[in-house]
Amino acid sequence: MSDARLLAAEVVESHVRAFFMGHTVEVVDYDLGPERREIVPDLRVLVVEPGPRSDSWAYVTAGCWASMEKHSHGLEFVMTAHVRDQRFIDLMAMIAYYHGGGHRLDLEHSMPIGNPWVPGSNCDHLLISLPYLHGPDLEHCPLPGGHARILWTLPVTTAEIEFRRRHGHEALEKLFDEAEIIPTDPFRASVA
């Protein structure tokens, strides 16, 4: 691991630990395997238990920034879920690989996940959004000479993605607000 990559991953981890003070944070070093390792070679997934700041689990990448930064600015991703499950750690690794493998995710982008978020869920895509559940204090992570932005990966349905394509991202977020969705509920009804 290069010094810059190591420093960036450590700063992101420190930022997440400070934000989730009072929560237990587990660091999972994730090896994408020999064919994919070069894309995000230093990937970690930070698994944050429920605690005083949030009653949900949070999964945060650390290592995307170092793989895809431009002019010392880059992204990391957070997902919130109702339980601790290896599938969410694997999904965060998938997001990191998708982002670093040429798809360069950003705010208001989406990606298919190929199957339901959890068995029986209608959510089969991820929408990249502002981290509304955690706010700008988690979103903005200063790095030496740069900045990491931590964006939310919200599980959504195919119908919601199609609605967003026709009506725009803001219109979809308005539907989420009106329906008062619980974003960690894998069995929530589609709003579109």
Image (cartoon, grey):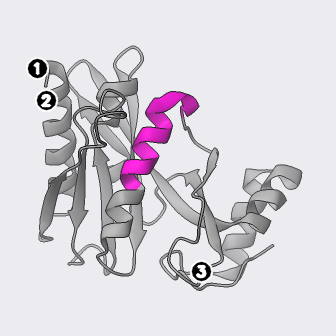
Query: Which label belongs to residue 121?
Result: 3
Q: Amino acid at mark 1?
A: Asp
Q: Are dots 2 and 1 in contact, CB under 8 Å? A: yes
Q: Residues in magenta?
A: 92-104
Q: Main secondary structure of the magenta part?
A: helix
List the residue tagged with mark 1: 3
Query: Which label belongs to residue 63?
Result: none
Label 2 SS:
helix
| Residue 91 percent location from the top left of the image | 42, 58
Direction from residue 152 to residue 176 in the image, left or right? right
User: Foreground residue, 9 or 86?
Assistant: 86
| Residue 83 percent location from the top left of the image | 33, 81
Earlier in the chain: of badge 1 and badge 3, it is 1
List the residue tagged with mark 2: 6
Residue at image point 63% right, 49% down? 110
Q: Is residue 93 above or below residue 124?
A: above
| Residue 161 percent location from the top left of the image | 75, 58
* Quarter where residue 150 is shown: top left
- What quarter of the picture does the C terminus occupy? bottom right
Q: Are dots 1 and 3 in contact, CB under 8 Å? A: no
Q: Residues within 10 Å of mark 2 (few under 14, many from 20)?
A: some
Direction from residue 125 to residue 154 in the image, left or right? left
